[in-house]
Amino acid sequence: MNSTDSPTSTDGPDSNDSPLRQEPTPRDEAPQFVLPLVVRIERNAPPSRTDALETAARAVVVMLSDERSSGDGEWAARVRDWQDARIRKVVRRARGAEWRKASELPGITVTGGGAEVRVFPPVPLDGWPRELSKLQVSGTELEDPEEPAGDVGPGHALIWLNPELRMSTGKEMAQVGHGAQLLWWDMDEAERTAWRDAGFPLAVRTAAAGRWTELAASGLPTVRDAGFTEIAPGSVTVVADHPVRD
């Protein structure tokens, strides 16, 4: 599922040149890149929805924190080009031989309770590898066998979904990935180190209506969708909250 709208590493949510803004900005003139994510969905053993969402969100920050994505790393130039333009993520799905072929490409596979998501270094918007471009992007729908636990342990970041929006699971995966990225950029170096060393623990939950109103007005990192697919432009999809401490 194609999704966009999260700020760059130097832009906060209210920056005048942030991809969260709806009017054209200089970022639209830059070459456009996309961060591909592929979720493994085997026909007889699909992951649960929340597990897939949390694994996708964690995959994004695993990519951002990888040494290959910064400095003189082999992916660093592509990551910088991606962050200098509109931040786009596309979630596709694969199984069987498709998953095995995708796993042979450079990237990182992140696992959850039962979910597997492989994140790849950014690619040009019109320059996808053949093994990824043929994978299906629309209609990714997963379910939770039971309601996710309400309690979240210390050290977990919380990524809240808007209870008023209906999105496909693929769209939600891209949105929570945006939220995790925003949160990573909102942290200072000590917070990043602690979160990374703990393995990026996080939880994705749908907020209650009253709680969502508070979150949206809280000043926490907030994702607004560009409205290319499924929902209206400017819709607030996600609010990300810092890890809970002891």
Image (cartoon, rainbow, N blue to C red):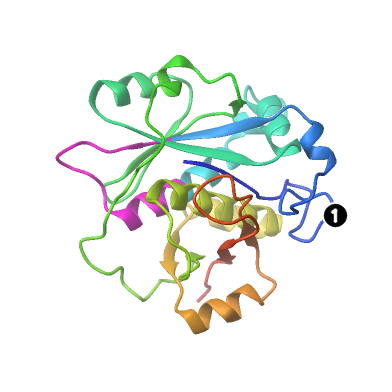
Local crowd size for mark 1, using a 10 Å CA cut-off: few (<14), some (14–19), many (≥20):
few
Q: Tell me residue 67's x, y (percent).
A: 61, 33
Magenta-span inclusion, residue 43: yes
Q: Which residues are magenta?
A: 38-56
Q: Tell me residue 194's x, y (percent).
A: 57, 57
State the image quarter where residue 82 is shown.
top right
Kind of residue indicated by mark 1: Asn
Q: Tell me residue 229's x, y (percent).
A: 53, 46
**56 in relation to 96, above or below:** below
Residue closest to the far left = 44
Q: Looking at the image, can residue 175 be seen?
A: yes
State the image quarter where residue 44 is shown.
top left
Residue at image x 54%, y 51%?
196
User: What is the count of numbered marks?
Assistant: 1
Residue closest to the far bottom = 210
Residue at image x 67%, y 58%?
190
At mark 1, the secondary structure is: loop
Q: Tell me residue 144's x, y (percent).
A: 26, 60
Magenta-span inclusion, residue 63: no
Residue at image x 59%, y 81%?
214
24 on left or right of 58: right
Q: Which residue is mark 1?
A: 16
Nearest the viewer among 97 and 105 is: 97
Nearest the viewer among 71 and 30 is: 30
Residue at image x 33%, y 49%?
112
Q: Looking at the image, can residue 197 be seen?
A: no
